[in-house]
Amino acid sequence: ALLEERDRLLEQLHALAEQRDALLARQAGLAERRDLLEMQQLEIDKVAPEEGEEERLEALRSQARDAEARREESERALLLLHGDEGPGLLDLLAEFERLAQRMGRDGDEQARAVAETAAALRQELSRMAGDLRRRPAVENDADLDQVEERLFALAQLKRRLRRTLPEILALREEIVENLSFLDVCSLDLSRLNKEEARLAAELGAVVARIVPLRREAATALTKHLEDQLRGLGFSEGARVLPEFSSHELWPGVSDERGRLLWAPNPGQPAQPLDRIASGGELSRFLLALAGLREDEEDATYIFDEVDAGVGGMTLNKLADRLEALAGKHQMLLITHWPQLAARAQRHFQITKVVREAATYTLCSPLGEEGRRDEIARMAGGGPQGKALAHNLLG
């Protein structure tokens, strides 16, 4: 449970370190751009664009231009009717009417009709002029000059920032977010550092509990190993010693790594197993470790020539230990000794054959007769081998 707690705290500390590194990396990148961001923010705030403003202004400009065009058209129509520096249509028509009336004084009925038509037309034109003067002005609250000035300011901003107006609005939000991040980043880093210090203190406390327990467990383990090894033919003076080296789990928090040192004979200095142990010694050492596992642990053991370098009485002790372990766990044993093979419940013969210039390894299960023949072969063959096989198998 302590080891699980240690690993959980370490995982949390590494996660905190990743968060801090990400914050520092973003902070460094934004700090280099802070002047640019603030300058862009100042330019945007100076113009203060609004969402949809450009489209709204363009619509107002279009309306204002339409209104101005209609006003100018009305004024032009009135000028045509009344005249500007010279006579207008009404003046010319009035003169035409008077001329037709004079022509009709001598009884020219056709001229009188023309005069009457001219009079009616003049009255209609007068009415039309009145309508034009009374025509309501087109409603337009927008000041065209102000609209044009505002559109020009927006166009200048887009040109300087090389962005569309929606992109500038998005940039403003991004700048505000980034500058706010830079302002509060130190607070976030301080919070993470405090959290790290708290977790590191917890980790140190857990490790402080683990170290003495580990050393205590190592002492018990090495004593049991020595007992197991003596039963496997090693010297009574064989020693197994734990050695611990410090390693840093986290800055300021160190744990210990343990390894086993081996002194097979009295008077020899203890050294690491992989430096001085023979293959047979390593196999027996592994067997001793396997014998210390809890019975409820589900494991399958595979021993490949665990009997290498072993003979005599030691071989019998090794066979007893293997048989005892096989009573609790499944075991696969590869051996050249008939004394070990005879203890197994099932036998398989491993052979190599060459077929069409290719080598194959075969594994064949053996029945009772094949088992006896193979044990006899392993014992040297002939009458002596058969006798030993009969003695071993009963």
Image (cartoon, helix red, strand yellow):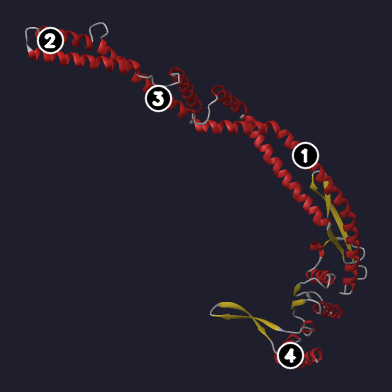
Name which of mark 3 and mark 1 comes first in the sequence. 3
Report the residue marked by disc 4.
372
Give SS at disc 3.
Answer: helix
Mark 1 to mark 4: distance in Å? Answer: 73 Å
Mark carried by residue 92: none
The residues tagged by marks 3 and 1 sit, at their Cα atoms, a distance apart of 61 Å
Identify the residue at horizontal 80%, vertical 56% (top origin).
4
Residue 309 located left or right of residue 113? right
- For the residue pair 166 and 392, the one nearer the viewer reads as 166
Identify the element where label 2 is drawn: helix
Pick whichever, 248 or 261, lies toward us. 248
- Mark 4 vs mark 3, foreground winner is 3
Q: Quadrant of residue 309?
A: bottom right
Disc 1/disc 2 C-alpha distance (Å): 107 Å
Which residue type does callout 1 highlight? Asn
Q: What separation in Å lies between label 4 and label 3 (alpha carbons)?
A: 112 Å
Q: Mark 1 points at which residue?
A: 193
Q: Mark 3 points at which residue?
A: 63
Mark 3–mark 2 CB contact (< 8 Å): no
Q: In which quarter of the image is residue 143?
A: top left
Question: Dividing the image into 4 quarters, which one contains the C terminus?
Answer: bottom right
Q: Position of residue 354 (x, y in %)?
A: 58, 80
CA neighbours of label 3 inside 10 A, class few (<14), some (14 to 19), many (20+): some
State whether residue 59 is above or below residue 279: above
Q: Which numbered circle lies on residue 100? A: 2
**Label 2–label 4 contact, CB within 8 A:** no
